[in-house]
Image (spheres, rainbow, N blue to C red):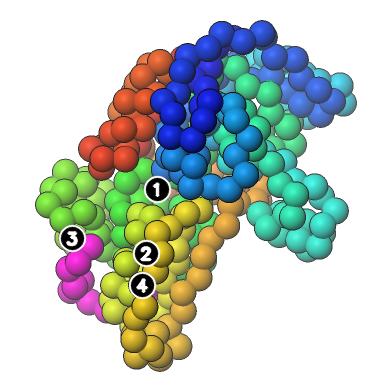
Amino acid sequence: MYAMVLAARGAPLTLQERPDPKPGRGEVVVKVSACGVCRTDLHVVDGELPDIAYPIVPGHEVVGRIEALGAGVTELKIGARVGVPWLGATCGICPYCRAGKENLCDRPQFTGYTRDGGFASHLVADARYCFPLGEKGDDTALAPLLCAGLIGWRSLVKAGDGKHLGIYGFGAAGHIVAQVARAQGRVVYAFTRKGDREAQLLALSLGAQWAGASEDTPPVELDAAIIYAPVGPLVPQALRAVRKGGRVVCAGIHMSDIPAFPYQILWGERQVVSVANLTRQDGTDFLKAAARARVQTHTTVFPLEQANEALAQLRDGKLVGAAVLEP
C-alpha cells in the first residue's frame, strides 16, 4: 500500500510505501477509492489539535470497498462499499457512551487523527464504525458526505427548527447543508469571505435566498446561524444577526479565539452552542436525509500524491465546494 504521511507538525505530507495492512479482531481493511479533504485535516497538519502522535496519515471522508475482514466481523462482506467517518471507535463504557452520546466519549479514536486515515490506498477501520453505502452514487461525490455532510447534519439538528437559517462559511459543509435545509423548507442565507463571488453564486444556485459577505447584515433576522469557518470573530457577528431566542452553532472542531462582545447581543435568550464529532445514528439519519434531498456535491478532484496542493488550496480559500483525493 501507499499513503501520504505527516511526519511532524507543519511538515508537507510525503508519499510512502508501506506493508499491506492486516485487520485485527473486529476490523476491516478498506481499499480506498476516494477521500475528501476536510478543514479538520488542516488542523491536524498544522498541529492545532492536541496530542498528535506522528507519523500519522490524515483523511476521514473515506469511500472504498472492503478487501479483508478481521476475526469476529459478520455484518460486513468482502467487496461491500462503505464510508469511514471521523469517529473511528469509542470505548462503549464511559458515562457518555452509556447515555447514547458516543460523540462525547472519554476515550475515542478518530480516523486520520489518532489512527491512520484515508489519504492512502488502504486503511484499517473498526467494522462497527463503517457505514454501508450501497451501490447508488459516485464514490467521489459521496466522499464529502462522510464529514462535511455528517457534521453539517449534526449542526443543522442543533440549530433547531427555525425557518431562516444563516450559514457562515459556504464550503464543503455549507453547500451540503444548504441543500438539506432547503429540502426541509427552510430559507437559507449564505455568508462567505468578502469578494468570494464564486461561493456566493454557488449558494444562490443551490437555492439560497441571499448571499453576501460575513460582515454583511442579512435582509431578515435569522432564527439560527451555523458557523463552519474556524473564525472566532464570526460568533459576535452571527449573534447580531439572530433574533431573540435564536441560536448560533459553532460547528468546527477548532476555532480561533472568540473576541469579547457586549452582553446585549447575547441577551434575549440567544444561545451559543458547539458541535462535537458525530454519532453513528447521525450517519444513519443523515444518509437518509441526503438521499431524500438528492444532495449533489461540488468537488475538485486531486490525485492522492497532490494532497499538499489540495490542502494549500483549502487553506487559501481557493476551493469551491469540496476537494477529494483519488488514489
Callout 3 secondary element:
strand
Question: For the magenta stretch, what is the residue range?
Answer: 213-225
First of labels 2, 3 by sequence position: 3
Q: Which label lies toward us, 4 or 3?
A: 4
Residue at 47 percent across and 14 percent down: it is 15
Residue 51 x, y percent position in the rendering: 62, 44
Q: Which label lies toward us, 2 or 3?
A: 2
Circle 1 residues within 10 Å: few <14, some 14–19, many ≥20: many
Q: Mark 4 points at which residue?
A: 259
Q: Distance between the residues labelled 1 and 2?
A: 18 Å
State left or right for residue 5 relative to residue 22. Answer: left
Residue 119 x, y percent position in the rendering: 50, 24
- Residue 200, numbered circle: none
Q: Quadrant of residue 86?
A: top right
First of labels 1, 2 by sequence position: 1
Residue at 29 percent across and 51 percent down: it is 170
Q: Name the residue under label 3.
A: 213
Q: Quadrant of residue 294?
A: top left
